[in-house]
Amino acid sequence: MNKTQAYNTKHRERYLDELMEFLRIPSVSADPNHAEDMMKAARFVSSQLQQAGADRVEIMATEGHPIVYGERMLSPDLPTVLVYGHYDVQPPDPLDLWHSAPFEPVVKPTEKHPQGAIFARGSSDDKGQVFMHIKAFEAMNKTGELPCNVKFMIEGEEEVGSAHLGPFAAAHKDLLQCDVIVVSDTGIIDNQTPVITVGLRGLSYVEIELTGPNRDLHSGLYGGAVANPINILSEMIAGLVDENRKVTIPGFYNDVLTVSDEERAEMNKAPFELKAYLEDLEIDAPCGETGYTTLERTTIRPSLDANGIWGGYTGKGAKTVLPSKAFAKISMRLVPNQNSEKIAKLFKEYFESIAPDCVKANVTYLHGGEPYVMPIDSEGYQAGYKAMKKTFGKAPIPMRSGGSIPIIPLFEEVLGVKSILLGFGLDSDLIHSPNEHFGLFNFYKGIETIPWFFRYYSELMG
C-alpha cells in the first residue's frame, strides 16, 4: 500500500482542484432549470472515472437523470466491490444565509476543521465523499495495488427520492453483480472518533393540501365566519404529536422494533456532550419523545416533522387576505420493521379523517424508503472496521444514524447484497443547509482509508 499512499500524497493538490471543479456545477436535481447542469455533472463523473483507469464507463439513461456506471474488472476470481454515490445536490436556498456563493467553493478554517473546510453545496453530501472513492480507486489502479474488481454506480436523483434507481438496478442485475456495496454518505462523530454506520432510519414523505373557500377572501369581510386553511392546518399539524412528543396517528408504533435495555446502554456509551450539542445549535434544551435520550431519539425511535408550510400572502408589506388554500410537507423517519408506504397510508387516512367540515384535506405520498441494519459480523463491516482502525489509530464505533438512504435497503432486496456505510463527514457540516462544508482532513482521510477497505475486504473474502 506504500505506492498508493505515496501517489495520494503527490497528487493531493490536484485532487482538491478537481473536486472544486465538480462543486462548481449546480447539479440541483429538484429544479428542472438545472437539467443541463445535471448532465454536465454526469459527464464530469464519467471523465474522472476514465481518467482514474476504469476500463468501462457509461452514462446510462433513466426516465429521470442519468446514472454514471464505471468498472475495472481484473479477474472473475476476485471479489467485486460496488461503489454507490450521487452527483446531485440539494437546492442552495435560502441564498442570503450563505457566507459565500454556494457553487463557488472556498476553503477556510472552522472550529472543528482547523486545517480548513471546503464550503460549497454538495461538498459533504455527496460530491466530496463520492470523489474520495474515485481518487482512491485512481491511486490503487495507477500504482498496480488494486486488489479486487471495482464497479461504480453514481446516480443523479438521490436528493429527490431515487425514483428511477430501483427499476435501473432490477433491469441491470447482471451488470451490478457484486459481493458488497460501499457507500460514503454518512459520517463520523468527530475527527478523532471514527464511526461505521450500521443502521439507518427509513423515511415516509407526504404533502398536504388543505382547501377552504373557492377563492382568496377579504379577511375583514369574511374573517371569523369562514375557515382559514392556514389556521386549521397549523392546528392539525400541532395535534400530530402529544405532550410527550409521541406521534398520535393510530397504528404508527405497531411495528416499531423494541431495542433492549442492554443495547440502549451500549449505544449511549458513544461520545456525546449534550451541552456542546445545545451550544452548537444555539438552543436551551432538547425536545423529543419522553423516556429517551437525544441519541436514542435520533436513531432507534421514529419521528414526525413539518418540513415546510405555506399559503396566503407572504410578500412584503400587508395584504389582508383569507387564503383559499394552505400546504405543508411532512417527513416521518422510521425505524426497523416500519414500512414507508404503510405509514403514509396511515397518515393519509388519519389526517383526512380529522379535517373539520369547513375544509377539505388531501394528502399525497411523495416518496419513501425503508430502515436498514447491517450485521457487524459481515466481511464488509469487518473490512471497514480494520481500515478505519488502521488510518485513525483507534477502533471505530458501530452506530445507527438518524438519517435515511432509501436505496440501501432496496439494494439488498434487488441485488441481494449488504452495504457498508463508510462515511467521513461530521454532523456539523451543515448538509442540506446554508454554508455546507467538508473538512480537508476528512476528504484526505477518506482517500487514505478506502484503499485499506479494498485490501482488507479482499483478504477476508479469500
Image (cartoon, rainbow, N blue to C red):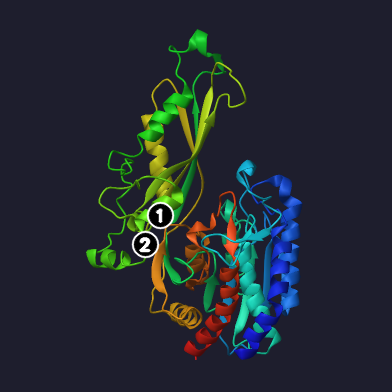
- Mark 1 touches mark 2? (CB < 8 Å): yes
Q: Is residue 34 above or below residue 221?
A: below
Location of mark 2 (residue): 272
- Could you say which disc has been placed on residue 277 in the image? 1
Above or below for 59 versus 321: below
Q: Amino acid at mark 1?
A: Tyr
Q: How far is the residue under mark 1 from the one under mark 2?
A: 8 Å
- Rendered location of residue 122, percent (x, y): 62, 58
Q: Is residue 81 above or below residue 58?
A: below
Give the quarter of the image for residue 394: bottom left
User: What SS does tag 1 mark?
Assistant: helix
State the mark number for residue 233.
none
Q: Nearer the viewer, residue 291 or 242?
A: 291
Whole-percent x, y for residue 247 in the image: 33, 43
In the image, taking residue 162 as reference, residue 44 lies left or right, namely right
Dot 1 or dot 2: first in sequence order is 2
Query: As rendered, which of 278 and 22 lies closer to the eye?
Result: 278
